[in-house]
Each structure stands twice: as structure tokens, then as C-alpha cells.
Image (cartoon, rainbow, N blue to C red):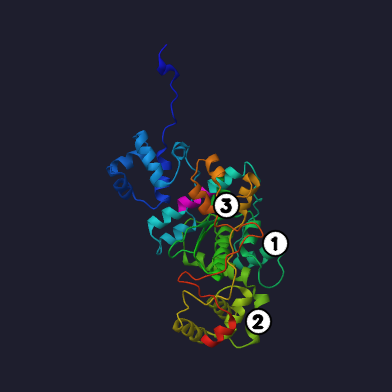
């Protein structure tokens, strides 16, 4: 009897997995080919399934892309529309960055769904509504939120069954949202790292607005963005609650700093809210914005020791399924993923209580301050 009769054949390399890992690591076909000392057409053929890499080439490819060889022999990854990432890409975010963020989120979603076989996901109860203000008000009632600032915006979003994924820093894009999975039934929000605490809260609420208001919309309009912002403003800064704060004293930099410390959103967002509620006029709005610009705070405002909100649900599911860890090597091996990738995702989530909590820092350094020192600056 011939030995070949008993030969065990390895599953073929899935070209779509090669493309996924390549885009996730930020390589183009040409740059990856250069690293492997092969022709770009070979990469193209492998990704399209026309050719199979040799065992040696697959091993080098796996090492370069930081994934086990078993990753590339899996079936196709779950499809996930780009959602509001498409909105951003039509503006200022490059295609390469979009592809990287998309694949990172898609693989994170796959990780969550595979974990759901071991631990239940939070039931989805994201409403659908056409009116942004009505949607925000009804959602606060649904979540049984008290009047005033929300203690944890991201935690509230996760309570709705939204999968909030921390992704590496994306230039010119704070967050994005999409409906993914089978029948596009899973709401997903990706949050870019390296953002101040005040921007994270409003950005997350803004993307929740897209999930609620624009589920069937696949292209961006200025109106869509305005509606999402209107929802976020009313959800995070309800007119009925913040109005008295805005009229109590004249709107100034110091007053905005006080309100920022209370409401935990940017001074610029509070200033805009003042104009929306007709507490200040356009001229007064422009005057204060000039003061903010003069101090260089348009992109980086002072922080007042705000705690950065981070997603918790995805890491909690992993802890239920595999126990507490800070390396997740067993989980990565179970799901044919690299420990580096799993650690980058779960390590950016909120740890269990008792673990250190990150304090908000600006990307250019530690610019956290307090209101007393802020008065001296202003």
C-alpha cells in the first residue's frame, strides 16, 4: 500500500486571511513583497487564491505579520461594513488607515463572537428613531439615567449591547460605527486611542447616534453628521439639565472650565451648546472661540484630571471564558490569533476593579491641570 494513501494534507492557505493580516499591519502588497524579497504579483496571486505559498514562505510571512500559520488556514473572516468609516474616508482619512482600522475591528468582532460561545454577549437593545433629540431623551429614560452628567458614557453604550472596540490611534478620526455580523444585526463602535477624555465621551455618543438614526444609510451627508451631533449633545448634555448651568454665570473661559469639569466634555462642546440653546449669540460664540484659539486649545484643551473611559464588555467576556490574564496566550492559541493582537485589544479595555485606571493625558505630553492653575493661565 502506498504511503501517499495515508498522507495528511494541511488546509490550504486562505488568501483573504493573508490580505486581512497585511492590511491590519499596515503593509501594501508592494511593501510586503519587498520585506519578503518576492515579486508583488506573488502576493496578489496568494491573496486571490490563485497560488499557494511554500511552507517556508508561509512561515516567514507569519513571523512578519505576527500571526501563527494556523491563522492563515482558517475560513473567511466575518464581513463587516465600513459604516461611518466611509464617511471619514471621503473627508480626510486615507485609504490605508481606513483599511487598517477596518480589519482590526473586523478581527476584534470575530474574537467577540467566538468568545460568545463560552460567555453570553449583552442582549442588543439599540432603538431606531428618526428624531435625534427625541431619541436621546428616550434613551436616557430607557437606561434609567439620573438628571445631569452621565457617569460613564461608554458603559451606557455597552449596556445597549453595542460592542465597543478600542482600536489603535487613527489620525483625523476619533471613532466610527457600523452594523455588522449576520444580517448586520450587531452594532459596533470603534474608538481610536490617544484621545483626551472629553473627546472620547462625545465621540462615542456621536457614533451611537449614527447607529440609532442612520442604520440603513450607507453614504454621508452633512445632515447625517449634524443629526448625530445633535443626538450626542442632547444625550450627554440634556438641554433641560444644562440650561441652568449655562445661564447662571456669564460664559467665559473660566466658566467653561468649571462646566467642563462637571460635564466632562470639551469647553468647545459646551460653548457650542450655549449657542444652540440661544444663551449666547454668534458674535459671542466667535469671540470666545478666538480666545480658545489664541491659547492653542482648539485641538488640545487643558484636562482636569479626568479619567479616560474605556470599553469593558469585551474584556469581561474573555475573563468569564478564560479567566483573568494580562497576556491572553491561551486565548490566542485557542482562536489561532497572535498574543500580540489579543493583548492589544483586551489590554486597551478597562481592567477589573482594583486594577490601575489610566488618567487622561494629551498626546503631546502630560498637560493635565486643575481649575486653580487654569485661572492663572487664563
- Residue 152 locus on image (x, y percent): 64, 65
- Residue 26 circle label: none
Q: Quadrant of residue 258?
A: bottom right
- Residue 50 locus on image (x, y percent): 34, 35
Dominant secondary structure (helix, strand or loop) of the stretch shown in magenta: helix
Mark 1: few/some/many CA within 10 Å (<14, 14-19, 20+): few
- Secondary structure beneath dot 3 equals loop
In the orientation shown, which residue stands out farthest toward the top?
A: 1
Of circles 2 and 3, which is in front? 3
61 part of magenta stretch: no
The residue that mark 3 highlights is 326
Q: Find out whether the residues at labels 3 and 1 contact each other: C-beta distance under 8 Å.
A: no
In the visual, does 316 lie left or right of 47?
right
In the picture shown, does residue 274 fall above or below 340?
A: below
The residue that mark 1 highlights is 143
- Residues in magenta, as a range: 102-108
Q: What is the C-alpha distance between the residues marked 2 and 3?
A: 43 Å
- Secondary structure beneath dot 2 equals helix
Mark closer to the chain start, 3 or 1:
1
Mark 2: few/some/many CA within 10 Å (<14, 14-19, 20+): some
Amino acid at each position: 500500500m502506498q504511503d501517499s494513501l495515508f498522507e495528511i494534507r494541511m488546509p490550504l492557505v486562505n488568501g483573504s486571511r493573508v490580505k486581512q493580516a497585511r492590511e491590519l499591519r499596515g503593509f501594501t502588497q508592494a511593501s510586503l513583497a519587498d520585506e519578503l524579497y518576492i515579486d508583488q504579483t506573488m502576493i496578489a496571486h496568494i491573496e486571490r487564491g490563485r497560488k499557494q505559498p511554500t511552507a517556508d514562505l508561509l512561515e516567514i510571512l507569519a513571523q512578519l505579520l505576527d500571526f501563527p500559520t494556523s491563522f492563515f488556514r482558517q475560513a473567511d473572516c466575518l464581513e463587516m461594513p465600513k459604516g461611518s468609516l466611509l464617511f471619514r474616508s471621503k473627508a480626510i482619512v486615507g485609504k490605508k488607515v481606513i483599511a487598517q482600522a477596518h480589519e482590526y475591528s473586523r478581527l476584534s468582532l470575530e474574537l467577540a463572537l467566538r468568545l460568545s460561545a463560552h460567555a453570553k454577549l449583552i442582549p442588543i437593545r439599540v432603538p431606531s428613531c428618526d428624531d435625534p433629540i427625541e431619541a436621546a431623551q428616550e434613551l436616557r429614560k430607557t437606561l434609567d439615567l439620573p438628571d445631569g452628567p452621565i457617569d460613564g458614557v461608554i458603559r451606557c453604550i455597552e449596556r445597549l449591547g453595542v460592542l465597543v472596540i478600542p482600536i489603535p490611534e487613527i489620525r483625523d478620526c476619533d471613532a466610527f460605527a457600523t452594523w455588522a455580523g449576520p444580517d448586520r444585526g450587531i452594532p459596533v463602535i470603534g474608538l481610536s486611542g490617544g484621545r483626551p477624555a472629553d473627546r472620547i465621551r462625545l465621540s462615542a455618543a456621536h457614533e451611537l447616534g449614527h447607529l440609532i438614526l442612520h442604520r440603513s444609510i450607507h453614504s454621508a451627508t452633512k445632515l447625517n453628521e449634524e443629526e448625530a451631533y445633535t443626538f450626542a449633545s442632547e444625550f450627554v448634555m440634556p438641554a433641560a439639565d444644562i440650561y441652568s448651568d449655562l445661564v447662571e454665570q456669564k460664559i467665559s473661559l473660566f466658566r467653561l472650565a468649571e462646566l467642563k469639569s462637571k460635564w466632562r466634555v470639551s469647553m468647545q462642546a459646551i460653548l457650542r451648546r450655549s449657542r444652540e440653546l440661544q444663551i449666547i449669540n454668534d458674535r459671542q460664540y466667535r469671540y470666545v472661540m478666538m480666545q480658545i484659539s489664541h491659547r492653542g486649545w482648539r485641538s488640545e484643551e487643558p484636562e482636569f484630571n479626568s479619567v479616560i473611559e474605556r470599553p469593558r464588555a469585551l474584556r469581561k467576556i474573555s475573563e468569564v471564558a478564560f479567566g483573568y490574564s494580562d497576556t491572553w496566550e491561551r486565548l490566542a492559541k485557542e482562536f489561532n490569533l497572535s498574543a500580540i493582537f489579543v493583548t492589544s485589544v483586551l489590554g486597551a479595555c478597562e481592567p477589573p476593579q482594583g486594577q490601575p485606571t489610566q488618567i487622561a493625558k494629551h498626546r503631546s505630553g502630560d498637560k493635565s491641570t486643575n481649575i486653580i492653575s487654569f485661572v492663572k493661565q487664563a
